[in-house]
Image (tube, rainbow, N blue to C red):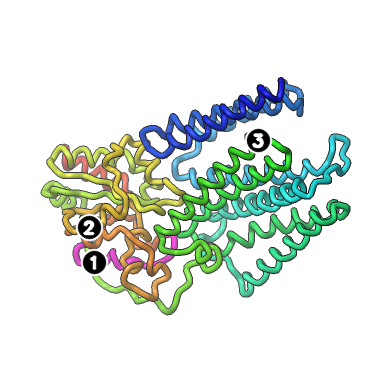
Amino acid sequence: MSPEIIGGIYIVTAAMFIYGLKRLGSPATAVGGNLISSVAMLIAVIVTMLSQQIVDYRWIAVAAVLGSIVGAVAARRVAMTGMPEMVALFNGSGGIASLLVGWAALYTANGEFGISSPFTLATIVLSILIGGITFTGSLVAWAKLAEKLGSGSGAFAGQRYVTLLLLAITIVCSVMIVASPAWTSPLIYVVIGLSLALGVFAVIPIGGADMPVVISLLNSYSGLAACAAGFAINNTILIVAGALVGAAGIILTNIMCRAMNRSLTNVLFSGFATSGPATKVEGEVKPITPDDAYLILEAASSVVMVPGYGMAVAQAQHVVRELGELLEANGAEVAYAIHPVAGRMPGHMNVLLAEANVPYDQLVEMDDINRRIETVDVAIVIGANDVVNPAAREDTNSPIYGMPIINVDHARTVFVLKRSMASGFSGVENPLFFGQNTRMLFGDAKASLAAVIAEFKS
């Protein structure tokens, strides 16, 4: 296959990537956009491996079939509650692949060191460094999301200084590799080891409430590592695809940081630091039964659903949609308010509601619903805690103070669906539960909503 044909195919696949990303911007076209980008990547991989004769094409076919089987099984078996963990592992896979590609690019087919260009060496070091950080950082994120590790900060005294020291040593070794290629062989092992350690030290101090931002950032890292690997092996499509993923991840990370009213530096290095003891939450909890909830909803003219991770755990998205349809049939205006960091990965709630065929035009962003929340008759909080916690607005000593929230406490009535009075993923107490206009509907969210639906149908 001539270089001209390969270049032409790369241009077509790059255009498909960009078009696929554009379609991902709308829930209505996202599935098609994802499919277009996936096909583009498959074409790029096959063309690259066949044209450069890296391995026998029969091995490529075997790998493609095995990969497709693994992907299909994972897509069908992994529950929606497990998607954040799956995305974390995907990010880690991208990171370790970039590390290995960069490492292999140092040597010729005979296993001898064969790099002379400082630019190529620099890109190799970058692909190894960013890839290593992404790999172990993603594994730590997966362990926290899967509750194999505690969701709180795992920082120890002086951790920042240890991390900075490791980073400084890594940078010095990287510069020495580029400046003196003769030292590359031993120093590259040091860079690999330190990059893996840095990934752990970078993510282990970050608390659970910041996990959506971390997932987005690691996704960006995996793209940047792939982009550097593309420069290292002089592969155009890998550079383009990596740059697109890296840029998209950075933009999303920035959006999510703004949604939390925090800087990326604060997320990475400070966690949810407190300035003093948080105000003790006191008051009377007012439980409610599904029968009573039905009577209030039956009289409501406007209802806002606020989903959270608890809805994913209960797999309640389908009954949420069914209740919404019944309320609309009863004459109520129904909307679904989505906080930018609800759930445990970017877009988690949007995906769940799309799976249940909730109309896209009923999804409302935080700022839009807050403008009219005082006119809402009933706000139903389904397994969400931190994104509706008034302490973020009122308690200057709260660890989450300053984070924009959905102001459900300003609605005329609030239903909070929870199994217990336990705090959210961030571990912060929620005064909303004790509000004058709050009613607690305890139990499994799916069962509670099904009981309310049964009242509507009776």
How many discs mark residues in the rendered view?
Answer: 3
Q: Main secondary structure of the magenta part?
A: loop
N-terminal of the pair, mark 1 or mark 3, is 3
Give the residue number, with chain letter if any, for mark 3: 236
Check disc 1 and report its element: helix, strand or loop.
loop
Q: Amino acid at mark 1?
A: Gly
Does residue 250 belong to the magenta stretch?
A: no
Foreground pick, 446 / 186: 186
Q: Amino acid at mark 2?
A: Val
Q: Quadrant of the N terminus?
A: top right
Q: Which residues are magenta?
A: 425-439
Q: CA distance from mark 1 to mark 3?
A: 58 Å
Does residue 427 belong to the magenta stretch?
A: yes
N-terminal of the pair, mark 2 or mark 3, is 3
Question: Quarter of the image holding residue 70?
Answer: top right
Q: Residue at x 57, y 53 (%)?
A: 143
Q: Could you say which disc has been placed on residue 414 in the image?
A: 2
Q: Residue at x 22, y 57 (%)?
A: 414
Q: Could you say which disc has been placed on residue 435 in the image?
A: 1
Q: Quadrant of the C terminus?
A: top left
Q: CA distance from mark 2 to mark 1?
A: 9 Å
Horizontal side of residue 25 vs 416, given as left or right: right
Foreground pick, 74 / 4: 4
Q: Residue at x 45, y 58 (%)?
A: 257
Horizontal side of residue 79 vs 374, given as left or right: right
Q: Amino acid at mark 3?
A: Thr
Tell which residue pokes out farthest to the left in this image: 299
Tell which residue pokes out farthest to the front in this image: 4
Q: Are marks 2 and 1 in contact (CB under 8 Å)?
A: yes
The reply to whether residue 114 is visible in this rendering is yes
